[in-house]
Image (cartoon, rainbow, N blue to C red):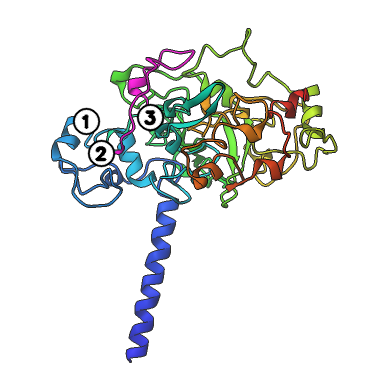
Amino acid sequence: MKTIKLSMVILSAFLITIGLIGYAEAYHDGGVARCTGCHSMHQSADNPLGPSGTPSAPLPVQSAIANGTLLKGTDASSTCLNCHKGSGSYKIYSTDGSNRKAGGDFFWVKTSYTYPGHGGSATSLGEEHGHNIVALDYGLIADSLSAAPGGTYLSSKLGCTSCHDAHGQVLGGTKAGQLPISVSGSYDEEAAAGTIRGNYRLLGDSVYRAGNLVSDGYQFTNNAPIAKANSSSAQYVDYGSGMSEWCRNCHAGYTGGTRHVAGNDEVLNGYGDNYNSYVKTGDFTGTIATSYDQLVSFERGTDDWTELDPTSTAGPSAGANVMCLTCHRAHASAHDNSGRWDFTEGLLEESHSLISTTLTETEKANAYYKGGSSIDIVTTYGEFQRQLCNKCHAQD
């Protein structure tokens, strides 16, 4: 009898663990999640995770009241980070840059580091490494810019819900006449009959007010992009279309002219041929079947998510586009301007993050990565690898 009871206890613990893992992974399910995950219904802090990341002392009751939305954090981003800070498949803010996802790690916007510069020591400022979201409970504050480059969105308002719709509505949701959401729009899941998929990564669309507050008065005009992510640890994303247009909801000034073009109409054409043949500096033996490089992403040029394959290694074909995320990461990176690589040095092995005198070896190793795994620049590309602009431009 004791053996049976022990077995039942072990089985129950196993099922609970699996259930919790599944719940954490699928919490949003592509749409609005349970209200009490983010909101405290009766004006209590409900013991959310504090700045230390441990469920010790709850936040003051006043914080939930003061923000006017009964959030379990002082602000929206703090509420998001109650679940999304740390290490793991759905985390975005680590203590060492180890969340090596396509979007990057907010660790870098809190991390300034020094490196040997021309004529002495120089500093790479953390606030220049990406989007400086405001999450007061976790020490994240606005940067010194007053508004988004090329736009008017106030830096003091920037947070997770500036880009992501925490309620996951598509074009206004069911109240606006849309069908219910049954699956995430980020992965290879078919919606059930009479339902729809959510937006990719819960991104706000053309009817979304950034921050989800009418008082902010900032209205998006472009819909969420078409993309599909690999649900495995590879963290590979196959982009279809609309990413640059979506970025312009806040960065409208980056539309061409003397700036680098990006968008649905910016077809790679001959640059795509360069991309497919370019392997690394001095090596043009690549083929379209295996030429995809995760450090230089592109859009396939389709608005049909079923045509996307987040396991494909194929390079661009006719109709493929250059986009904002070809060169930048959406959240943050180890490099200025949220660059996928260091734009300020000729040789990648001389990237400021790699020659830093203040970053730890672990942090340096997390600066460059593919498929969720860190890489060594010299081993991957070679000692004399030039900037990865050459993947399309072949000028090295």
Give the left or right position of residue 164, taking residue 375 as reference. left
Q: Is the Cβ of the residue at disc 2 closer than 8 Å to that at disc 3?
A: no
Give the left or right position of residue 87, taking residue 274 as reference. left
Residue positioned 73% across, 29% down in the render: 391
Secondary structure type for disc 2? loop
Q: Where residue 67 is drawn, which disc sits there?
A: 1
Q: Nearer the viewer, mark 2 or mark 3?
A: 3
| Main secondary structure of the magenta stretch | loop
Q: Which residue is mark 3?
A: 133
Would you place residue 365 above or below residue 328 in this image?
A: below
Secondary structure type for disc 3? loop
Residue 190 in the image: state x and y as whole percent: 57, 46
| Closer to the camera in the image, 128 or 147 | 128
Residue 113 in the image: state x and y as whole percent: 46, 33
Q: Is residue 354 visible?
A: yes
Would you place residue 367 above or below residue 153 in this image?
A: below
Residue 9 in the image: state x and y as whole percent: 34, 78
Q: Quadrant of residue 94?
A: top left
Quadrant in the picture for the N terminus? bottom left
Residue positioned 51% across, 34% down in the render: 334
The magenta segment: 138-161
Q: Where residue 7 is drawn, which disc sits there?
A: none
| Closer to the camera in the image, 369 or 351 | 351
